[in-house]
Amino acid sequence: MAAAKEIRTQIGSIKNTQKITSAMEMVAASKMRKAQDLMKAGQPYARQIRNVVGHIADANPEYKHDYMVEREVKRVGYIVVSTDRGLCGGLNVNLFKAVLKDAAAWREEGAELDFCALGSKAGAFFRKYGGNLVAAKSGLGEKPTVEGLIGSVKVMLEAYDEGRLDRLYVVYNEFVNTMTQKPVVRQLLPLSSDMGEDAGHDNEENARPGSWDYLYEPDAKALLDSLLIRFIESQVYQAVVENGACEQAARMIAMKSATDNAGNLIDDLEMVYNKARQAAITQEISEIVGGASAV
Amino acid sequence: MANSFTCNIVSAEDSIFSGTIEMVVAAGVVGDLGILPGHAPLLTELQPGPVRVFHDGGKEDHFFVSGGFMEVQPDHVTILADAATRASDLDEAAAEQAREEALKAFNDKSAELDYTRASAELAEAVAQLRTIQQLRKKAGKG
């Protein structure tokens, strides 16, 4: 019966693991709802400001902000949004793969790379990978605030202002639905006219890019300065909350399949256990029968 | 089409209003602006204050924004508010109290004070009261 006893302990320990994973699944499910609400709340603003900025990039403004001028690309910056904790399936790994693929394309063109890591997983990854990490921020929690992000975003914007960066991307997971999260690399700077969702099928005015300009109140410089900084902040904030929703969804799915796998394992082991028990009983009976006939 | 256009009002937390309207009146930093369909493209900063939306058929909606930006295109208007509420949700007593507190903080010379912040708070409280009064005047008339 020694083998049977071992199997029992193994089943016991898998059952414990299963309890933990199913608890984590439920926690992730409830957190996902909150994270999704946060994401949905911010979406209209992020989308509208992207449309507006898309229009600005289409216009032919009297004052060309630094963020609107396309420069020769010598150095590319990535703001990589990752999770703080693991156990969320391939979420972060897929994201890092997407960054490296995009970065490799730039490297081939001779550009150098800078990374800004939001979330401890990205920080750990780029430290190991050896990228040039210029800013890192972790421990954003479940309710990230714009204030918490400004610091690291500012590092990248200052680098851009001083001409040390010629292009800036934000990389995060896009929430398609609970089952699917898609890593996206989105260009922040310089502004491009295809940012807005309504690009391409707009009114006649916008069909002729570069031939019109806004009226500005108070004046173009002050207005664009504050609007564009607001734009960057809102985009990065939205990326962080969207990634947060992805994290919880991915964790929920990962924990669900872990729980299912534990269930399968237990079923298999129970089968093996029953067989072992049956074999032991059969053996005992045949021993008794053999012993009785010998007497 | 000729005498209506689409308008979106969004705040950092929510989409407040979206629909087809005839005219919108907002408080720009250099003065109130009334936007009609076919307006030239315009970008402006908004100061805390009321935004009035006129629907087809003369119906009118009031909103309060605490600053932000407005983009005008000939066939649509986008208002990016820092924070926005429907005017009917504003609480007059709370606004009055906020105004008094802001004034007190503003006049309190002894205390260490962040003047920009206090004046911003004051402006917001005053703008909220202005929105409420406007709404009340309208209700009194009708």
Image: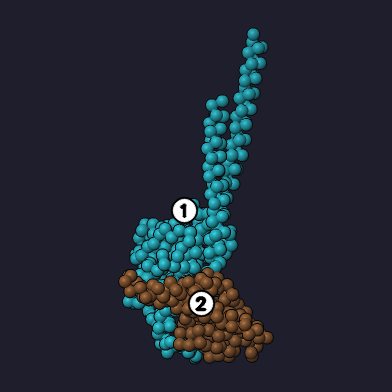
Chain colours: A cyan, B brown
Residue A151 shows in the view: yes
Residue A145 in the image: x percent, y percent? 45, 65
Q: Within 10 Å of the Cα at label 1, are there few (<14), some (14-19), or many (20+) other Cα atoms?
A: few
Q: Identify whether A35 is placed above or below A209.
A: above
Q: Within 10 Å of the Cα at label 2, are there few (<14), some (14-19), or many (20+) other Cα atoms?
A: many
Foreground pick, B45 / A104? B45
Foreground pick, B22 / A186? B22
Three-letter code for the amino acid on which mark 1 is drawn:
Gly
Residue A158 in the image: x percent, y percent? 35, 73
Residue A199 in the image: x percent, y percent? 55, 80
Q: Identify whether A293 is placed above or below B126.
A: above
**Residue A215 left/right relative to A286:** left
Subunit ID for the residue under disc 2: B
Query: Based on the displayed image, in which of its 4 quarters is residue B117 positioned?
Result: bottom left
Residue A231 shows in the view: no
Please give the residue where the numbered disc 2 appears in the rendered image: B128
Give a yes or no on whether discs 1 and 2 share a subunit. no
Total count of labels: 2
Please give the residue where the numbered disc 1 appears in the rendered image: A86
Foreground pick, A29 / B7? B7
Q: Residue at x 62, y 31 (%)?
A: A275
Q: Element under label 2?
A: helix
Instruction: Give how far apart the Cα atoms at labels 1 and 2 are.
Output: 46 Å
Residue A254 in the image: x percent, y percent? 54, 52
Q: Residue at x 33, y 74 (%)?
A: B109
**Residue A251 left/right relative to B54:** left
